[in-house]
Image: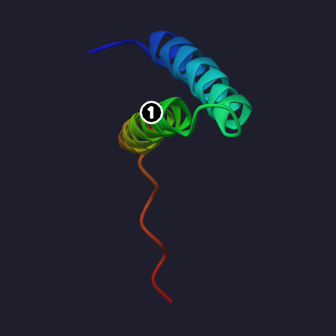
Amino acid sequence: MKTSSELKSYQQKLLTKYKELIEQAYNLRQTDSALSDISEYKAIKLLNKLNRLKYLSRERELSQHPTPPAPLS
């Protein structure tokens, strides 16, 4: 499994690519709607991947630092 810093770096790379695709889709919207749709679709797929990575990294952090049980009253 990748280390925490590798995951953060990978997430940053995906986020940069996502932003590029969204900008490309926006810029192509008026001139070529088909290419705009393709860029937007790719961006949505990347966003889905980013959300899964974010969830997994959060789960990983929680498993490394479990919360203590609540005190009984």
User: At label 1, which amino acid type do we have?
Assistant: Ile
Between residue 24 and residue 65, name the one nearer to us.
24
Image coords of residue 12 (percent x, y): 60, 19
> In which quadrant of the rendered image does the N terminus lie?
top left
> Residue at the location (59% across, 32% down)?
32
> Residue at the location (56% across, 35% down)?
36
Mark 1 is surrounded, within 10 Å at the Cα level, by few (under 14), some (14 to 19) or many (20 or more) other residues, namely some
Q: Quadrant of residue 13?
A: top right
Between residue 47 and residue 35, name the one nearer to us.
35
Image coords of residue 26 (percent x, y): 70, 36
Colour treatment of the image: rainbow
Residue position for label 1 = 38
For this view, does 65 lie left or right of residue 27?
left
Image coords of residue 48 (percent x, y): 41, 42
Q: Quadrant of residue 29?
A: top right
Image coords of residue 46 (percent x, y): 44, 32
> Residue at the location (51% across, 89% down)?
73
For this view, does 4 lie left or right of residue 17?
left
Between residue 69 and residue 2, name the one nearer to us.
2
Kindly state the secondary structure of the residue where label 1 is placed: helix
